[in-house]
């Protein structure tokens, strides 16, 4: 923007309302809207991008044209070299700087603070559309899970020589939080593997989450770290009411007034298959037609996935999260065998909120 020309001392006197030589008071700057998002360790690019976009869109709808300042932080998401991983780099550079900055007055990331030199645009789109590589391995080999091979899919790739798990404080430091459950904020916490050692998981700090004993018992035992983190994200939304246990009444009242839940939901009496169905619907996006088309072929694939890429923990035979993932991967295996290409709708779970059964 061009700089405003400074007025001469003479003109300052003339317009100063009799205040000899005194500079007139500057007009107060318009108050800005502060937008904040901390990219959680369990958020991938898509989930983080959609949430930041929703915050931006709602700010423009609620307070049209107000200057917007976005503060973007990143929790975890480290690569083998100790820098930020691919998802974090894409969120910062491609999404925040490349896509969002025109709709902001200012952007602050872990790397820098940027002002929009062209002035903030307010024609924020109604929807965010994200495109994906057409074929596995072509544009982004890390995006897909090879359902044919059922490989180990860790978040980091370097072989880790550690024989013992890292200290709880080291995991908390990596996650950027106090030692508490990622899902319900409860304590005490366990060091939960994203990929169990029995399935090839390492003792690298990136392969650990902090979960309370109850959520640790619910977490999936699978060979896919990204699917594990997606489940943590899903459970954090599903069980959001449990975060406010022990909070002051006025805090709980404020949460409820803003659309939040403050009551935990007991699912102990939920029948196993009903719980699996609920997770397939709300984590993996299955529709009623997907359940109606269940077949013997799908059951065969499901049992093969269970055998090759899942484990057992705490001696639990029927972990809802493990079996839901196995059903979903089995469905994708059948789709690939039939020649169906491109991402299935359920590859990218919805990231909003839903009614609790």
Image: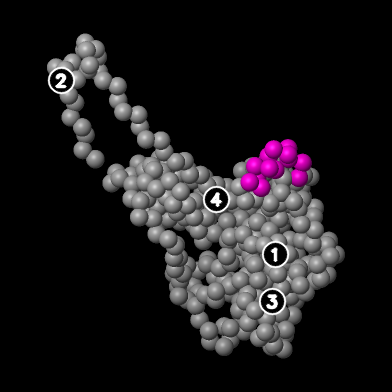
Q: CA distance from mark 2 to mark 1?
A: 77 Å
Residue 165 seen in render: no
Residue placed under numbered mark 2 in the picture? 11
Q: Name the residue rendered at 69%, 38% in the picture.
A: 250
Residue placed under numbered mark 4 in the picture? 39
For the residues labelled 4 and 2, say whether their Cβ atoms are less than 8 Å apart. Answer: no
Q: Residues within 10 Å of mark 4 (few under 14, many from 20)?
A: many
Q: CA distance from mark 4 to mark 1?
A: 27 Å
Label 3 or label 4, whichever comes before in sequence order: 4
Q: Answer whether residue 288 is magenta in the image.
A: no
Residue placed under numbered mark 1 in the picture? 200
Label 2 or label 1, whichever comes before in sequence order: 2
Give the x, y percent position of residue 164: 75, 51
Label at residue 327: 3
Magenta range: 245-257
Q: CA distance from mark 3 to mark 2?
A: 77 Å
Label 3 or label 1, whichever comes before in sequence order: 1
- Where, by quadrant of the figure, is residue 350 drawn? bottom right
Give the x, y percent position of residue 129: 44, 65
Left or right of residue 109: residue 260:
right
């Amino acid at each position: 923007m061009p700089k405003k020309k400074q007025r001469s001392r003479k003109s300052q006197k003339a317009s100063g309302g009799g205040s000899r030589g005194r500079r007139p008071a500057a007009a107060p700057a318009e108050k800005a809207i502060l937008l904040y998002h901390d990219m959680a360790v369990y958020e991938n690019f898509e989930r983080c991008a959609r949430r930041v976009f929703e915050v931006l869109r709602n700010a423009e709808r609620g307070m049209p044209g107000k200057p917007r300042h976005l503060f973007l932080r990143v929790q975890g998401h480290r690569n083998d070299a100790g820098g930020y991983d691919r998802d974090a780099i894409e969120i910062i550079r491609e999404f925040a700087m490349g896509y969002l900055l025109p709709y902001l007055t200012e952007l602050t990331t872990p790397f820098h603070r940027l002002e929009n030199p062209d002035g903030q645009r307010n024609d924020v789109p109604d929807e965010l559309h994200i495109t994906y590589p057409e074929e596995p391995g072509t544009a982004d080999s890390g995006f897909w899970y090879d359902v044919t091979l059922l490989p180990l899919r860790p978040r980091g790739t370097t072989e880790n020589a550690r024989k013992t798990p890292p200290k709880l404080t080291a995991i908390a430091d990596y996650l950027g939080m106090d030692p508490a459950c990622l899902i319900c904020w409860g304590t005490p916490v366990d060091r939960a593997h994203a990929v169990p050692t029995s399935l090839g998981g390492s003792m690298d700090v990136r392969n650990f989450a902090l979960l309370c004993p109850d959520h640790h018992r619910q977490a999936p035992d699978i060979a896919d770290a990204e699917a594990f983190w997606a489940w943590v994200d899903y459970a954090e939304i599903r069980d959001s009411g449990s975060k406010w246990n022990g909070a002051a009444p006025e805090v709980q009242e404020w949460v409820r007034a803003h659309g939040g839940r403050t009551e935990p939901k007991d699912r102990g009496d939920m029948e196993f298959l009903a719980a699996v169905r609920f997770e397939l619907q709300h984590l993996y996006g299955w529709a009623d037609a997907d359940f109606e088309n269940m077949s013997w072929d799908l059951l065969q694939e499901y049992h093969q996935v269970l055998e090759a890429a899942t484990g057992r923990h705490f001696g639990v035979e029927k972990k809802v999260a493990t079996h839901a993932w196995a059903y979903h991967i089995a469905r994708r295996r059948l789709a690939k065998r039939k020649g169906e290409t491109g991402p299935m709708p359920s590859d990218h779970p919805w990231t909003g909120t839903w009614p609790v059964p």
